[in-house]
Structure formats: C-alpha cells, structure tokens
Image: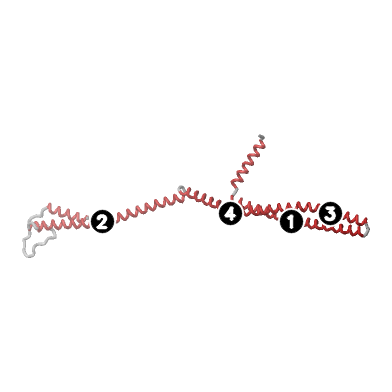
C-alpha cells in the first residue's frame, strides 16, 4: 500500500469519526425529511412537466392524424374531379402527416409509460415521506428520552461526589454539632439550677445543725449558756454574772462554724 493511500485512509477515517460524533439524531432526521420533501417537490415538477409534454404530443398526434385524414379526403376529391396529379400531391401530403402521426404515437406511448412510472414513484415517495415523518417523531421521542435518561443517570452518578452533596453533608454535621451544643447548654443550665437548690438545701442543713448545737448547749449549765453569744437569760430568774472564763475550744468551734457559714 502506498503512502498516499495510507494517508488518504487515515484522513477519511478521522473525518468519518468527526462526522459520526457530530451527528445529532434529531437534526439528521429533520434534515433527511427536508431532503425527501425537496425530492418530492422536484419529482412533482418532473411529473407535471412529463404530463404537459404528453399532452402536447397528444395534441400534435391528433393534429397530424387529422391532417392525414384531410389529405386523404382531398386526394379522393381530386381523383373524382379527374385531376390525378392533384390527387397524387394530396396523397404525398397524407403520407407525410401519417408518418408524423406514427412517430408522435410512438413518442406518446413512451411518454405515457414515463408518466406512469413518475406517478408511481411520486406516490411511493409520498408514502415514504409520511412513514419517515412518523418514524422521525418516534425516533426523536426516543432520542429525547435517551438524552434525558443519560442526563439523569449522569446527575445521579455525580451526587455522591459533587460539591453540592458535600455541602449538604457538611451542613448536616454542623446542624448536629449545634444540636449537641444546645443540648449540652440545656443540661448545664439544669445542672446549675440543681446545684443552686442543693446549696440552699445544704445551707438549711447547716443552720439546722447550728440550731441543734445551740439547743444542746442551752440545755447545759448556766455558765455554758452565758458563754453562747446571742443567748439571753431567763426573764423570771435573776442570775449573777458568771465569773468563769469561756471555754476556748467551744469558742474556736463556734467561730469556725460562723466562718464556714459566711463562706457558703
């Protein structure tokens, strides 16, 4: 194989590939129907022209046939009148017109055959165009459905890795984090409230314990009652002031309890 043949084949192969990729079924079908309709118009014009030519030939044939008959009658008339030369001339004219009519008859038969063929082709082409239009609409619908399905499948295929889907996943994580923080804040608020009530309850327990200790101390000796701050003597009994020194251990414990209460 020569170099030019190989290059030509490569070029044709590339062109065919480009053309194949560029072919859109819908556009090709539309153009095909348009081409067929243009062929139909041309065929109709050809049929019309053939019919018109057939009619002209028919008229010429009829005229030649009429002239031949006329010269036949004239020849008979001349012969009846005794003019043989004129009769011979009339027969020559008849022969010429008869030959012309015969030629026209042959041509007329050929035109009739051609017109019939063109009419059959015209009917066949009209049927093909009607079928092509129906098939075109069907194929266009199928092509549109195939394109839509291809786009849908492509979109579905991109959903898992597309940035839009990634954004949805990120936003979902963010919403979950916000919900977790909100729940944690609610739990902390509830815990703080619980701790406040616990402190109140704890404070009440200390006060109760302090009151109990005071009551216990009040139930002791008069000297001990005089040592407790905030305790008053019985109004009905006059007691002499105690000269005993306060118990340092009790005072220290009492101060420690006061300090603890102040810190709460």
Quadrant housing the C terminus: bottom left
Residue on which disc 2 sits: 194
Q: Nearer the viewer, mark 4 or mark 3?
A: 3
Q: CA distance from mark 4 to mark 1?
A: 35 Å
Query: Under tag 1, what secondary structure?
Result: helix
Q: Is residue 42 visible?
A: no
Q: CA distance from mark 4 to mark 3?
A: 57 Å
Colour convention of the picture: secondary structure
Q: Is residue 77 visible?
A: yes
Query: Under tag 2, what secondary structure?
Result: helix
Query: Under tag 3, what secondary structure?
Result: helix
Quadrant housing the N terminus: top right
Q: Nearer the viewer, mark 1 or mark 3?
A: 3
Please state which of residues 262 and 77 is positioned toward the viewer in this rendering.
Answer: 77
Image mark for residue 98: 3
Residue 193 drawn at (x, y percent):
27, 57
Q: CA distance from mark 4 to mark 2?
A: 77 Å
Left/right placement of residue 104 relative to residue 183 reads: right
Please state which of residues 156 and 203 is positioned toward the viewer in this rendering.
Answer: 156
Image mark for residue 137: 4
Callout 1 environment at 10 Å: few (<14), some (14 to 19), or many (20+)? some
- Residue placed farthest to the top in the image? 1
At 39% from the left and 53% from the top, the residue drawn is 175
**Contact check, label 4 and label 2, Cβ < 8 Å:** no
**Contact check, label 4 and label 3, Cβ < 8 Å:** no
Q: Tell which circle, 4 or 2, labels the residue nearer the N-terminal end.
A: 4
Q: Nearer the viewer, mark 2 or mark 1?
A: 1
């Amino acid at each position: 194989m020569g170099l030019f043949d190989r290059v030509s084949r490569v070029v044709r192969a590339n062109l065919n590939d480009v053309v194949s990729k560029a072919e859109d079924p819908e556009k090709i079908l539309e153009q095909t129907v348009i081409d067929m309709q243009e062929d139909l118009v041309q065929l109709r014009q050809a049929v019309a022209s053939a019919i018109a030519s057939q009619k002209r030939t028919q008229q010429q044939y009829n005229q030649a046939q009429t002239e031949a008959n006329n010269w036949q009658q004239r020849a008979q008339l001349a012969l009846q009148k005794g003019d043989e030369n004129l009769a011979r001339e009339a027969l020559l004219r008849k022969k010429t017109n008869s030959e012309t009519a015969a030629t026209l008859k042959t041509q007329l038969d050929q035109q009739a055959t051609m017109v019939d063929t063109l009419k059959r082709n015209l009917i066949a082409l009209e049927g093909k165009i009607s079928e092509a239009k129906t098939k075109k609409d069907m194929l266009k619908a199928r092509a549109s459905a195939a394109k839509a399905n291809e786009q849908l499948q492509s979109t579905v295929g991109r959903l898992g890795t597309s940035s839009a889907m990634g954004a949805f996943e990120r936003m979902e994580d963010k919403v979950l984090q916000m919900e977790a923080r909100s729940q944690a804040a609610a739990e902390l608020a509830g815990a703080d409230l619980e701790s406040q009530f616990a402190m109140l309850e704890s404070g009440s327990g200390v006060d109760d314990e302090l009151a109990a200790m005071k009551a216990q101390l009040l139930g002791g000796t008069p000297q001990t009652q005089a040592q407790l701050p905030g305790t008053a003597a019985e109004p009905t009994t006059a007691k002499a002031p105690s000269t005993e020194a306060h118990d340092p251990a009790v005072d220290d414990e009492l101060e420690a309890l006061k300090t603890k209460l102040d810190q709460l």
